[in-house]
Image (cartoon, rainbow, N blue to C red):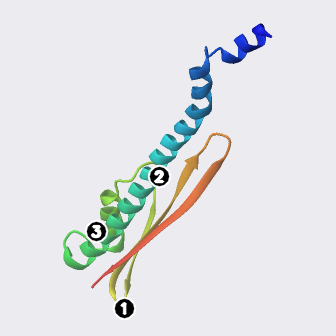
Amino acid sequence: MILRWHIIADQRGSSALEFAIVGPVFLCLVIGLIYGCLLLFTMASLQYAVEEGSRCASVKTTVCTSSASTITYTQAAYLGPFTAPTFTSTTAACGHTVSGSTSFRFDIGLAALTVPLSAKACFP
């Protein structure tokens, strides 16, 4: 009986066990937070790039003389990570329209999740 109480009352290794329970959860939260921030930055950068491209096509007519030069200007304005977005430039009823699309990939290790992103801006 004394031996059993000694084993139950022994607290050696309890902090290692607690870390084994809490550590992976904390690590997943930190990695998820980093991926979430990268996703938000990619979305914001894509929106900023299409806004700059449509503004350039309307206002900076010496720089953005054609659809190809507008797309080149828009690609230079994009600062997002990991992806190479596709941009298109057209003239619509609202003015010069630039749209862009890309996909952001969450690589979880065992699986991968792809999130499609798109942005569109029109500047008179």
For residue 36, the mark is 2
Quarter of the picture containing the C terminus is: bottom left
**Residue at mark 2 to residue at mark 3: CA–CA distance:** 24 Å
Q: Give, as a three-letter code, the residue at label 2.
A: Gly
Along the viewing direction, whichever of 40 and 94 lies nearer the viewer: 40
As drawn, 20 above or below 4: below
For residue 68, the mark is none
Q: How far across and how far down the image is residue 100, in percent?
A: 44, 68
Question: Which residue is located at x 37 percent, y 67 percent?
Answer: 47
Along the viewing direction, whichever of 105 and 70 lies nearer the viewer: 105
Mark nearer the N terminus (1 vs 3): 3
As drawn, 115 above or below 58: above
The residue where tag 3 is placed is: 52
As drawn, 59 above or below 38: below
Q: Give, as a three-letter code, the residue at label 3.
A: Glu
Q: Which of the 4 image quarters holds residue 25?
A: top right
81 left or right of 11 in image: left
Element on which disc 2 rests: helix
**Residue at mark 1 to residue at mark 3: CA–CA distance:** 19 Å
Along the viewing direction, whichever of 65 and 6 lies nearer the viewer: 6
The residue where tag 1 is placed is: 93
Element on which disc 1 rests: loop
Q: Give, as a three-letter code, the residue at label 1.
A: Ala
Q: How far across and how far down the image is residue 80, in percent?
A: 38, 53
Mark nearer the N terminus (2 vs 3): 2
Label 1 packing within 10 angstroms: few (<14), some (14-19), many (20+): few
Q: Which of the 4 image quarters holds residue 70?
A: bottom left
Element on which disc 3 rests: helix
Q: How far across and how far down the image is residue 72, in percent?
A: 33, 62
